[in-house]
Amino acid sequence: MILLYHNIIPDNSPLERYCVGQALLQSVFERQIKWLIEHYKIVSLTEYLASPCYPKRDGLKRIAITFDDGFDIAFQCIYPFIVRNAIPVTIFITTGHLERGNLLWFSYLKALCFENQYKFLEVNQATFWLNTLEQKIHGWNNLRAYAREDGDPVGFCRKLSERYPIDATVSSTYQGMTYEQIKLAVNSGLFELDAHTIIHPYLTGLSKKEQEQEIIGSKRALYALTGQPVRYFAYPGGEYDQTTLEIVNQGGYEGAFAIIPQKLGYPLFEIERIGIYSQSFLKFQLKILGVSSFARRFGLKVG
């Protein structure tokens, strides 16, 4: 089993920063990993793919830990714990937001809706008040839908940021890893850094040339930063099509990761991962035990 995390934030973070999923509190993450250490053997992604996940002589099933996006705050939270416990981790990095680059489009929307920058927003002839948590979640859901419907969520948020800029202090909470963190990760020998596009678009909404720029360009940028082989690719939002698969194959990747495989004929480039989004330890255990995969067959969802 390959697990997918996104962001890990300090325990004293306000509820607004983790109320809509994907961000886990640091203590929640550490509890999950400690439990995995007791019941599974955590291996690198490369080792996992090279060998079946069935129990070995030690009687333990293999499991691999991955992160998407490469957030500064997540690295700050996990790095000491990962090093202290010698846990191999793969981070799929979106290169465009590194070293105080532009916020990823959905990070901008989260900051816009949840960080008390504005009392209300006027977008697409609709007004979204942002006084209560319920209103903030409503605004977030609608703006994210608008961005998706626009066909170019990155461009949509870029235009929106001209009207509604985010304070630099707030932006720093959502920024990507620094080059110094990249160096720390590489030098630790525990982190493998792989590609997750440049600006985190939905690849299926791009032309072939644009997909190539994101898929191949991010690989080149990451190699230039680390000097390490970039073996794997993760699809933003888990979305891809036949063109995407062909580009990944031609780009020299050894594997690529979806969330739910579409089974388009490239098994090495449609590898399933299990997303961990809930603070609930019970839901986490159910996912690890395979309940979520079973429930998915019936259209049900486990955190």
Image: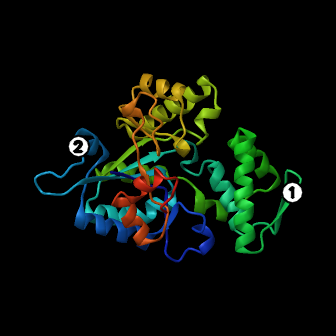
Give the foreground label among 1 and 2: 2
Q: Earlier in the sequence, mark 1 or mark 2?
A: 2
Q: In which quarter of the image is residue 213?
A: top right
Q: Please report the residue visible at 57 percent of the width from the left and 47 percent of the height from the top.
A: 97
Residue, far left: 57
Q: Residue at x 70, y 39 (%)?
A: 152
From the viewer's perspective, is 168 left or right of 183? right
* Residue farthest along the right direction in this orientation: 125
SS class, disc 1 = strand
Q: Is residue 148 left or right of residue 231?
A: right
Residue for badge 1: 126
Q: Can residue 297 be seen in this view?
A: yes
Labels in figure, total: 2
Q: Which is nearer the eye, 251 or 138?
A: 138
Percent x, y for residue 154?
Answer: 68, 43
Rate crowding at label 2 as few (under 14), some (14 to 19) or many (20 or more) other CA atoms within 10 Å: few
Q: Which of 44 and 163 is in front in this view?
A: 44
Q: Name the residue under label 2.
A: 52
- Residue 88 position (above or below residue 95): below
Going by the picture, which residue comes out furthest to the bottom?
12
Tell me how far mark 1 sits from mark 2, CA to CA.
Answer: 52 Å
The reply to whether residue 230 is in sight is: no
Query: Which residue is rendered at x = 64% and y = 26% of the image?
Result: 207
Percent position of residue 117, x then y? 75, 66
**Amino acid tagged 2:** Pro
Q: Residue at x 69, y 67 (%)?
A: 115
